[in-house]
């Protein structure tokens, strides 16, 4: 193992013994390793936080420390196991929740949660419902936490009017000379510009509260019990920050209730799966329903539509900018991704009443 990684691991408060370190997982943002101490039964996860994505990684760690400490108290009060049901940061030898290496990069370490697995895709409604339960439980358990005490680690991460403005700016600049081929997609977004304000306007009007939100509610960010399959712990808390419940609900629907791949070229395959919407809504609201106010629940379908539209606008803007943010694997990849998202928005609009009815009756 690289001597640098080994020396960084030894700067955390670990049991005495020889360390065995290996690359771990398939994440695309942070550099991740599994650390095993020869004489100890406990394993650890060591990660370098990507400073390009998170310009202020100290704020990311501060948010995680506050949220996990609060969760430990709630979980214990509910009779759960805090060491298994939320992440546990390992202190450095300097009693800080991170280590800064000689290159100025920030590293953090967690306890490894044993006896769990992760799945990338919700292949069945039952699995998607378990994902909904886990994220709904996270929302419920964080319901009493002051969301405004957290830092906004990525400014305007889910602010659909801002994302719309960024798209229009990218179209005006046309840095890669691609605007002519995407006029139809731009028109699609312009027709829905007024709707992009729905959630932020509801917050400003006091109709819905600011919440602690996860902001990356994919199934692979839930650890599942290897024996029972139940959701154990929500992980990847890097994007935890102040937000709206509809963001988390909506991003899950965008990701898990699409009948096609995110970059599907044959748009006839793209459709909103109502059984998957029902499954996630059932799981999510079984846990979070008692925490959310009536207006928040009414706006959950709009969260699904706006998160899908927002993601499409981000892909389209990156295509116009020359593919500088999202990794591509073929020419026009970001444009394919944008078109898929917009096709899913159309399907949501066609099935709007059914989707709203599902949410209203969970």
Image (tube, helix red, strand yellow):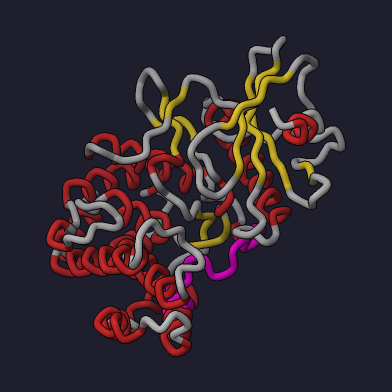
Span shown in magenta: 149-164
Q: In the rendered view, would you say 38 is above or below 237?
A: above
Residue 42 in view here: yes
Magenta stretch: dominant secondary structure: loop
In the rendering, at what x and y percent does residue 202 appear? 42, 74
In the rendering, at what x and y percent does residue 296 appear? 38, 62
Magenta-span inclusion, residue 72? no
In the rendering, at what x and y percent does residue 4 appear? 77, 35
In the rendering, at what x and y percent does residue 299 appear? 33, 65
- The N terminus lies in which quarter of the figure? top right
Query: Which residue is depicted at the point 67% across and 61% down?
Result: 55
Left of 239 or right of it: where is 205?
Answer: left
The answer to which image quadrant residue 223 occupies is: top left
Q: In the rendered view, would you say 25 is above or below 57?
A: above
**Which residue of the protein is positioned furthest toward the bottom in this rendering?**
172
**Which residue of the protein is positioned furthest toward the front in this rendering?**
331
Left of 206 or right of it: where is 186?
Answer: left
Query: Which residue is depicted at the point 25% across and 38% down?
Result: 123
Residue in the foreground of this view, choosing between 19 and 115: 19
């Amino acid at each position: 193992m690289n001597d640098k990684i080994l020396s960084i691991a030894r700067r955390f408060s670990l049991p005495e013994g020889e360390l065995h370190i290996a690359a771990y997982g398939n994440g695309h943002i942070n550099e991740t390793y599994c650390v095993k101490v020869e004489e100890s039964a406990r394993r650890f996860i060591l990660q370098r936080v990507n400073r390009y994505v998170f310009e202020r990684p100290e704020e990311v760690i501060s948010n995680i420390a506050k949220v996990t400490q609060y969760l430990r108290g709630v979980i214990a009060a509910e009779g759960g196991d805090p060491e298994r049901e939320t992440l546990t940061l390992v202190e450095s030898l300097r009693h800080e929740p991170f280590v800064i290496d000689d290159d100025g990069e920030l590293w953090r370490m967690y306890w490894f949660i044993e006896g769990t697995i992760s799945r990338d895709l919700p292949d069945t409604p039952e699995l998607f419902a378990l994902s909904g339960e886990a994220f709904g439980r996270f929302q419920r358990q964080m319901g009493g936490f002051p969301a405004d005490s957290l830092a906004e680690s990525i400014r305007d991460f889910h602010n659909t009017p801002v994302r719309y403005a960024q798209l229009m700016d990218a179209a005006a600049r046309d840095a890669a000379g691609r605007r002519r081929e995407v006029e139809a997609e731009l028109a699609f977004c312009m027709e829905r510009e007024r709707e992009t304000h729905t959630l932020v306007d509801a917050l400003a009007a006091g109709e819905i509260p600011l919440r602690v939100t996860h902001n990356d509610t994919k199934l692979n960010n839930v650890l599942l019990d290897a024996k029972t399959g139940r959701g154990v712990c929500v992980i990847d808390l890097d994007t935890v920050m102040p937000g709206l419940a509809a963001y988390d609900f909506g991003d899950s629907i965008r990701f898990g209730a699409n009948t096609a791949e995110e970059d599907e070229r044959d748009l006839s395959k793209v459709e909103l799966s109502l059984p998957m919407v029902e499954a996630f809504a059932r799981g999510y609201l079984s846990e979070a329903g008692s925490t959310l106010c009536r207006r928040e629940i009414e706006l959950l379908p709009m969260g699904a539509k706006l998160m899908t539209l927002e993601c499409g606008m981000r892909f389209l803007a990156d295509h116009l900018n020359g593919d500088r943010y999202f990794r591509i694997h073929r020419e026009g990849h970001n444009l394919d991704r944008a078109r898929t998202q917009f096709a899913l928005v159309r399907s949501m609009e066609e099935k709007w009443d059914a989707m709203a009815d599902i949410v209203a009756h969970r």
